[in-house]
Image (spheres, helix red, strand yellow):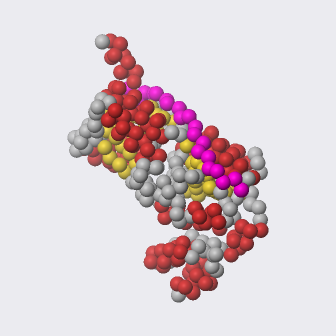
Amino acid sequence: MSISMKELAKKLNISASTVSRVINGNKNVSPETYRLVMDAVEKYNYIPNEAARNLKSCQSTTVGILVSDLSNSFYTSIIAGAESEFKSHGYSIILSNYNEDYYQQIEYTRLMLSRNVAGLIMSPSGDSKPYYDKFTDASVPIVYIDTYPADRPDCDCVMIDNSTAAYRLANHMIDMYGDDIFILSTHEGYTITDGSHASDLRYNAIKQAFADRGLSVRSGYEYTSDKSTYSAGYEYISRLLRDGIRPRALLSTSNNITYGAIAAISDSGLTVPSDIAVACFDAIDPTGLVRPRITSINQPAFKMGELAARLMLERIAHPDDHFSQKVMVEPIFDIQESCGYSEFLRQKDAK
């Protein structure tokens, strides 16, 4: 049972107006007070009274979509696909971007629930304990996309087989460069460390591909970042090259960090793929202007958004169905210039 704002303020011995400022996203309070209120909101399951009444009395036609990085073209394509499907059924969307920040993700899930959404589509980071039961209690379905929390295997999700896809991409690069491959991976903060996150699954599959070929990753030839950002890729690969470590190839588990790595290679006076070959996931270029074009395992993001929306609409229409669905989609293996495959074939034919 949710408590009122006044009751929450009384428990914390602060004013209701201070609690209100924190709940409504006004950060003009001290960090200590902000964390105090947010922890209490979690502990006492606070939902604004008006929203709580609406949850019981209204049938919402708004669906929330929560993604980890709105600057990533993969997520914008997912959103476009979902919005197209929802619009055709008379639903609108509320969009939030948590910037790969686990605590911000938790705040936004709470905000979505307070806004009386009919359902939530999200790309999760970390476990679901702080929010999942609240959505279940309010009969608001969640559909995960791209990956799902390790503590929620019995959930609805739209995704690819990340392990199989990464294993295939790794073998493609091993065929050409053996063990002279640097592995650049990501592991977003607060993600459970049992390999459930998409990047974890990809990383583990890459390592397995090496092992199955009788190889091991060279010492100093792997780096895991807690952010899958352009700057993270640029900064680390720049430092790597300055330190004199120059692998023949780079294999990455995500796109934005790869773009930064390619920029660092270029700014170091090297070229892709002549000096360092590159392959990654989801290097989708809708403009067709990026050069060299990047070899990539591409998820059909727009289609995944559509499928997530259809699954959500099914859940809304049939709230008493309790079985979960994992909808698996087939990725596209797009061999382009960046991995040096054409030159590899030319040299192979010349022998």
Relative image position of residue 287 (x, y in whole percent): 55, 35
Q: Residue at x 71, y 73 (%)?
A: 50
- In the rendered image, the quadrant that contains the N terminus is bottom right
Q: Residue at x 43, y 59 (%)?
A: 190
Q: Is residue 322 above or below residue 297?
A: below
Which region is colored magenta? Answer: 320-340
Was residue 281 drawn as part of the magenta stretch in this picture?
Answer: no
Relative image position of residue 237 (x, y in whole percent): 32, 44
Instruction: Tell me which corner region of the image, top left, top right, bottom left or bottom right, holds residue 23.
Output: bottom right
Q: Is residue 37 above or below residue 84?
A: below
Q: Is residue 335 above or below residue 261?
A: above
Q: Residue at x 43, y 42 (%)?
A: 202
Q: Residue at x 58, y 81 (%)?
A: 8
Instruction: Tell me which corner region of the image, top left, top right, bottom left or bottom right, holds residue 78.
Output: top right
Observer-nearest of 197 and 10: 197
Residue 293 appears in the rendering: yes
Q: Is residue 160 above or below residue 228?
A: above
- 140 left or right of 339 in image: right
Relative image position of residue 144 (x, y in whole percent): 58, 51
- In the rendered image, the quadrant that contains the C terminus is top left
- 191 left or right of 315 in image: left
- 285 left or right of 172 in image: right
Observer-nearest of 275 and 297: 297
Q: Residue furthest top?
A: 350
Residue 262 appears in the rendering: no
- 288 left or right of 214 in image: right
Observer-nearest of 70 and 3: 3
